[in-house]
Image (cartoon, helix red, strand yellow):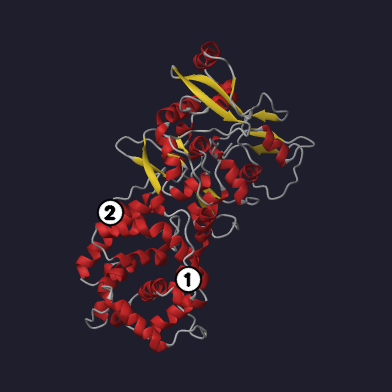
């Protein structure tokens, strides 16, 4: 076709026709008057039409698979999806690394690895010449290295692959702050390169910032955004924090120990050791996790330095981080909309943009939020930016309940697990994913216990238990006291009663009426709210 095609929204807007306002319908109807209703492209599977969006006539293209097609000024290309899977598969390794640091190598383990002690000493001496860290041989470090090469070999192999995605951006930020580039290995120790990592005490992200420390170094945390999960923002903050710690101690080993346990604990260890200031001399007086922290860091550095000698391969990454780019978002937009318009999966968007907690990039006055995309997709977004925002506005306006009004800061809730609950059921109720609930609450499995509290950020309206309402006009039960009571009739069950009153679940009925089983006696009056009457 002679001109660059614009956003393809005809099919989506037509499907939303029942929700369009009168003015919107008039604009849509005007489409047929301004151009032919449907034109066939050379490809019979492609249909082209036009539609008015805010008074502008735009060319639209849709394919028989129902997907939109945006066209960039240059031919688009795709990355190998196996690389995305590689990064996703690393999420479970965070707990393995944490366990290794906290417990250390098992004392009764025998590590069978081709690494004579004399060879290790020589290699560590060569590493020491190239780095400001104090790398000297000791038996504890040897045990950790051999443990990583045997029990954690798969973890190390995966880190070598995933590092190709994150290390280029780490090195750029570390260089900007004049921090040793070897600090990049610290992110492996902290999070196993999982930007969504969350510790049992609430530290989050690649660099494991606590809430207060993150805020101190400029990381924004809100209902929509948690910049502790953003690789670039968090790396900038970590660089500033480490620079400050080095300024205090004048030693990178002690700075790392302070990063893990806080400057106060390092100072206490120095005092208890009698004034020693070398990490290995104060190590017995540090918290247990910190005692395993620097050895894990040095072991990781060694394995990356001598990976080839130990048979660990650098599997080429098809999508290194520097082959992505960012664009500042001007208006609220969801990952679902971006996925549909730019032809990229929501899973990939989540991986590239981990700071957005609800898969929504908000518009907040005074804030600039960026969207990271592969370079093959960034051109599509920039070249069609005006049309994209027009489509998003049209779609949100056409919804019965606009999304921005449904998702607000007060919608962060604490849900108490009840009998019969499971993650899929809870996720469906609040319009979120099971993986999101697990991520928000640091869950490693799908198992729940009754009474457990879950933090949830709902993406769809819900009726809280004290706001439950019933429709007395449609109920066959005897309802009194302003629809707060249901009188059980023959044939009633908790399930049939819950279906009569929107927002009332079986669990609600059990909780409000002290019911443990399923048997109901005709004539029993059941409360339909968390109320005294």
Residue located beneath label 1 in the image: 99
Q: Quadrant of residue 298?
A: bottom left
Residue 12: percent from left, percent from top: 56, 27
Choose between 24 and 158: the one closer to the eye: 158
Left or right of 160, for residue 45: right
Choose between 503 and 352: the one closer to the eye: 352
Residue at point 65%, 45% (across, down):
510
Q: Quadrant of residue 333?
A: top left
Residue at point 52%, 25% (across, down):
60
Residue located beneath label 2 in the image: 216
Q: Is residue 369 visible?
A: yes
Q: Is residue 394 above or below residue 91?
A: above
Q: Is residue 206 visible?
A: no
- Is the residue marked by circle 2 packed among few (<14), some (14-19), or many (20+) residues within 10 Å? few
Helix, strand or loop status at disc 1 = helix
Q: Quadrant of residue 271?
A: bottom left
Q: Disc 1 versus disc 2: distance between alpha carbons?
A: 28 Å
Residue 325: percent from left, percent from top: 38, 45
């Amino acid at each position: 076709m002679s001109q660059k095609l614009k956003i393809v929204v005809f099919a989506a807007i037509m499907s939303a026709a029942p929700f369009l306002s009168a003015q919107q319908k008039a604009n849509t109807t005007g489409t047929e008057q301004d151009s032919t209703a449907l034109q066939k492209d050379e490809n019979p599977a492609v249909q082209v039409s036009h539609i008015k969006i805010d008074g502008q006539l735009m060319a639209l293209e849709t394919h028989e698979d129902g997907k939109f097609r945006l066209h960039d000024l240059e031919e688009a290309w795709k990355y190998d999806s196996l690389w995305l899977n590689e990064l996703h598969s690393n999420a479970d390794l965070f707990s393995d690394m944490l366990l290794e640091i906290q417990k250390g190598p098992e004392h009764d383990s025998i590590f069978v690895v081709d690494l004579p002690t004399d060879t290790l000493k020589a290699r560590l001496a060569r590493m020491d010449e190239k780095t400001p860290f104090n790398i000297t041989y000791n038996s504890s470090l040897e045990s950790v290295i051999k443990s990583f090469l045997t029990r954690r070999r798969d973890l190390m192999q995966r880190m070598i692959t995933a590092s190709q995605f994150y290390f280029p951006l780490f090195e750029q930020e570390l260089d900007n702050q004049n921090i040793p580039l070897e600090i990049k290995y610290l992110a492996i120790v902290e999070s196993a390169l999982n930007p969504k990592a969350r510790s049992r005490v609430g530290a989050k992200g690649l660099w494991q910032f606590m809430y207060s420390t993150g805020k101190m170094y400029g990381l924004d945390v809100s209902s929509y955004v948690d910049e502790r999960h953003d690789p670039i923002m968090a790396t900038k903050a970590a660089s500033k924090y480490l620079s400050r710690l080095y300024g205090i101690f004048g030693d990178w080993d002690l700075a790392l120990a302070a990063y893990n346990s806080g400057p106060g604990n390092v100072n206490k260890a120095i005092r208890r050791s009698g004034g020693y200031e070398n990490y290995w001399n104060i190590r017995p007086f540090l918290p247990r996790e910190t005692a395993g922290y620097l050895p894990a860091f040095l072991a990781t550095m060694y394995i990356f330095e001598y990976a080839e000698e130990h048979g660990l391969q650098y599997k080429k990454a098809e999508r290194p981080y520097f082959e992505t780019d960012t664009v500042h978002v001007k208006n609220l937009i969801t990952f679902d909309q971006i996925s549909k318009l730019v032809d990229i999966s929501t899973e990939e968007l989540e991986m590239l943009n981990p700071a957005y907690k609800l898969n929504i990039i908000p518009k907040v006055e005074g804030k600039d939020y960026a969207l990271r995309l592969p370079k093959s997709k960034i051109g599509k977004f920039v070249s069609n930016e005006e049309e994209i925002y027009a489509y998003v506005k049209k779609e949100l306006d056409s919804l019965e309940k606009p999304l921005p009004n449904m998702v607000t800061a007060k919608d962060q809730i604490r849900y108490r697990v009840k009998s019969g609950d499971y993650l899929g059921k809870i996720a469906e109720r609040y319009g979120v994913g099971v993986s999101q609930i697990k991520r928000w609450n640091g869950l490693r499995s799908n198992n729940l216990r009754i009474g457990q509290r879950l933090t949830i950020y709902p993406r769809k309206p819900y009726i809280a238990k004290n706001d439950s309402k019933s429709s007395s006009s449609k109920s066959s039960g005897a309802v009194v006291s302003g629809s707060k009571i249901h009188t059980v009739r023959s044939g009633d069950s908790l399930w049939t009663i819950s279906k009569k009153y929107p927002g009332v679940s079986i669990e609600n009925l059990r909780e409000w009426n002290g019911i443990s089983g399923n048997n109901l006696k005709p004539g029993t009056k059941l409360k339909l709210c968390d109320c005294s009457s």
